[in-house]
């Protein structure tokens, strides 16, 4: 194990691999900063580039993107009260009031440091869990893996955002069905190709990812065409004070990171749920709760540490069992399949150094991301002033050209537009798009394991203890989804769709639950000239006026 | 009944569910033409999916309400005001622009299509000045050229003006 870890580190520190890691980190920071983009869309944009690449730099780039996505989303959360992604929502509670008190630098410094340690602790836990999990993973046969795929699908369907849990499972089934297009795995024939040569190899994953996630988000972004911030942001000192705060609350960081990682390992429980839970736990675990919600640095440190360690938790089921823990992990899984790397027991058995590369990439990306945020905080904060009208056309071109990389065929562009329209419809319906993608990614694996299970054991495979246990868990989750919808609501991904509405709803609900101040406000960050003006605060009323305008 | 009819409907949800019903029904029937070993999976998924779609349809129509995690009313009132004002119009506008880009890519090739499309998009949709639009478009072409040369990307070569080979390949193995 140690040899594999060292081998992985040696491979990763090659300059070209570090370069790709840095590229992923930069794209991840930018994606985390802009509400609506986030990890899934950012990764979808990078996916066409990984064709034909060596797995080490490609994985470094993808993990680099995902690892820091939750670091940069702190900027809009603290400065403007608008989270860049789902995971940043809980940081608003205390980060934004701190900014209003002129301590934005301190809040950001604490958030970055806590994020970095959260990510590193998550990566260390990943290193430690792999050898422990190895025998369990290798003991799982095809029937258990088949059941795990169904379990992951039902879990994500139930827990992901959407008005009806059934709609999530329905979309998962549609994804599974779409994955059957093309050559059948068990017999020499083609299914659902309608005589079109383009469909013989099935629908490319890259196109499904970009169509379902990127196109609807970009259309929503440009349709609203609002910058996150109107004014340029200049952050003065305080960041090292924030870093010191994090060291002072080291046990909070450790506890948040461990809990974040554990919750992240449950498929369907996203970063948003984890950070809210961690914020709740943080507020409840101190005697003096009076400052929470008004600018308590512990309210920033707890959620931020959990936020970044969640990624390591997400990676566990994704890498060890091939069951993606959420939408971004489904995209990562797809990227790995494009690289010829099949997550699951084979990865542990045949390619342990590659698994270790992922853990190292996670740790290094967190350090690099935090360093960039510390050094370039003013420049990064300025990105919040970019109009979507300038950014979106460029991303649209990137998507179209990226889709063309799949088969270099006219069909790529046509299918992209069809899936994009479907994805937009799903978004408008208020359904979660993650189950569709997860169904599509898991479809071939599920069918393959089903065939192998039937070949090896016949119908008796359903009587295996592992299958029965996972089957019982799956049924329990499905039942729970219907009898306890209100409880599950707290575990939903409110911003997977990238809209502000659900986040604000969640913030309001949380404030009400913990009797915290109920005003949601947007701060206008003072420019250097207007630094003295401490009252440059716009309240909900002015925000509403702007909305109306 | 009156309450059912007066309840705000999730039109997108109903349309999607109807589409799902058609897809699952068709797949269930069409899958029977495959060899037995290849029809298990799609048939099973289509059957389960059809039942699920029926259940979702009942839910979306407001006939049953189990498993409802949030009320429809809540979503409608709390949605971003601008995005719920004219969603279809905006969607069709931008989808039309994407269709035009796809058509342009296939007729005049990537370089020319992207340049002209970006120029027009920046100028008329993003309301940038001509000079800024030109600068952004040129910058985008330069970035595409560099990425294509480094990563050996495929660029669509148009029927009318093949442009895919305008950019020399730089052989660096990553």
Image (cartoon, coloured by chain):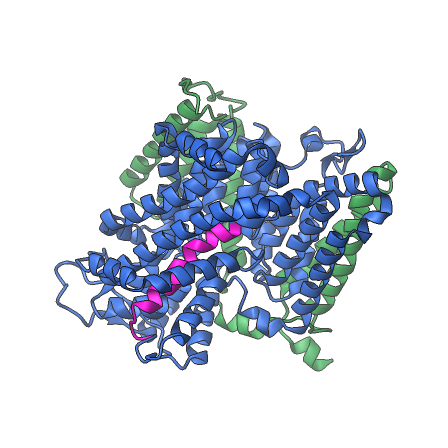
Left/right of residue A292 with respect to residue A335 in the rendered view = left
Q: Which residues are magenta?
A: A293-314
- Answer yes or no: is residue A305 visible: yes
Camera-side residue of A340 and A252: A252
- On the rendered image, what quadrant is the C terminus of chain A found in? bottom left
Residue A104: x and y, percent?
A: 24, 63
Camera-side residue of B82 and A250: A250
Camera-side residue of A75 and A368: A368
On screen, residue A139 above or below A109: above
Q: Colour of chain A?
A: blue
Left/right of residue A5 with respect to residue B7 in the rendered view = left
Q: Colour of chain B?
A: green
Residue A317: x and y, percent?
A: 58, 49
Residue A168: x and y, percent?
A: 64, 59
Question: Picture quarter containing residue A131?
Answer: top right
Residue B66: x and y, percent?
A: 69, 73
């Amino acid at each position: 194990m140690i040899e594999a870890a060292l081998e992985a580190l040696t491979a990763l520190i090659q300059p070209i691999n570090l370069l790709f890691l840095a590229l992923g980190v930069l794209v991840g920071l930018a994606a985390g900063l802009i509400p609506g983009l986030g990890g899934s869309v950012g990764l979808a944009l990078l996916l066409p580039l990984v064709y034909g690449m060596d797995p080490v730099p490609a994985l470094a780039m993808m993990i680099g993107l995902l690892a820091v996505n939750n670091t940069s989303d702190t900027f809009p959360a603290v400065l403007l009260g608008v989270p860049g992604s789902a995971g940043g929502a809980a940081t608003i509670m205390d980060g934004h009031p701190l900014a209003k008190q002129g301590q934005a630098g301190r809040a950001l410094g604490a958030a970055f440091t806590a994020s970095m340690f959260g990510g590193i602790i998550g990566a260390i836990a990943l290193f430690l869990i792999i050898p422990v999990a190895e025998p369990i993973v290798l003991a799982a046969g095809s029937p258990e893996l088949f059941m795990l795929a169904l379990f992951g699908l039902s879990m994500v369907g139930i827990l992901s955002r959407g008005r009806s849990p059934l709609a999530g499972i329905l979309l998962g089934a549609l994804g599974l069905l779409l994955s059957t297009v093309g050559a059948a795995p068990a017999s020499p024939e083609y299914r659902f190709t309608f005589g079109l040569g383009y469909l013989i190899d099935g629908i490319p994953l890259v196109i499904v990812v970009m169509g379902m996630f990127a196109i609807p988000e970009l259309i929503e972004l440009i349709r609203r065409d609002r910058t996150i911030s109107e004014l340029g942001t200049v952050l003065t000192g305080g960041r090292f004070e924030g870093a010191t705060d994090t060291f002072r609350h080291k046990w909070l960081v450790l506890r948040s990171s461990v809990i974040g990682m554990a919750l992240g390992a449950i498929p369907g429980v996203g970063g948003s749920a984890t950070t809210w839970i961690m914020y709740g736990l943080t507020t409840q675990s101190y005697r003096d709760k009076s400052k929470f919600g008004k600018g308590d640095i512990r309210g920033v440190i707890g959620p931020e540490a959990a936020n970044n360690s969640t990624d390591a938790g997400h990676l566990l089921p994704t890498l060890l069992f091939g069951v993606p823990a959420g939408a971004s992990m489904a995209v990562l899984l797809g990227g790995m399949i494009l690289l010829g790397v099949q997550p699951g027991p084979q990865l542990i058995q045949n390619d342990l150094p590659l698994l270790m590369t992922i853990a190292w990439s996670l740790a290094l990306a967190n350090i690099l991301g935090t360093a960039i945020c510390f050094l370039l905080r003013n420049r990064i904060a300025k990105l919040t002033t970019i109009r979507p009208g300038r950014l979106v056309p460029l991303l649209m071109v990137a998507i179209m050209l990226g889709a063309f990389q799949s088969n270099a065929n006219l069909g790529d562009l046509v299918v992209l537009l069809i899936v994009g329209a479907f994805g937009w419809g799903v978004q408008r319906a208020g359904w979660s798009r993650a189950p569709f993608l997860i169904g599509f990614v898991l479809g071939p694996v599920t069918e393959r394991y089903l065939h192998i299970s039937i070949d090896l054991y016949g119908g008796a495979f359903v009587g295996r203890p592992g299958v029965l246990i996972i089957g019982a868990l799956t049924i329990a989750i499905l039942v729970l989804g219907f009898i306890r919808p209100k409880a599950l609501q707290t575990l939903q991904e409110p911003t997977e769709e990238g809209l502000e509405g659900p986040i604000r709803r969640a913030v309001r609900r949380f404030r009400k639950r913990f009797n915290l101040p109920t005003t949601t406000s947007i701060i206008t960050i003072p420019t250097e000239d207007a630094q003295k003006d401490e009252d440059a605060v716009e309240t909900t009323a002015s925000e509403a006026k702007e909305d109306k305008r | 009944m009156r309450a059912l009819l007066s309840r705000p409907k999730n039109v997108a949800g109903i349309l999607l569910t109807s589409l799902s019903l058609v897809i699952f029904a068709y797949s269930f029937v069409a899958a029977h033409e495959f060899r037995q070993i290849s029809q298990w999976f799609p048939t099973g998924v289509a059957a389960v999916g059809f039942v699920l779609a029926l259940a979702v349809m009942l839910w979306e129509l407001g006939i049953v309400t189990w498993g409802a995690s949030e009320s429809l009313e809540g979503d409608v009132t709390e949605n971003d005001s601008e995005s719920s004002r004219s969603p279809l119009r905006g969607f069709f506008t931008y989808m039309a622009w994407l269709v035009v880009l796809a058509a342009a890519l296939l007729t005049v090739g990537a370089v020319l299509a992207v340049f002209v499309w970006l120029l027009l998009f920046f100028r008329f949709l993003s309301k940038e000045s001509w000079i800024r639009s030109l600068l952004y478009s040129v910058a985008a072409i330069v970035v595409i050229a560099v990425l294509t040369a480094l990563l050996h990307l495929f660029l669509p070569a148009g029927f009318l003006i093949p442009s895919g080979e305008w950019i020399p390949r730089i052989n660096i193995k990553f």
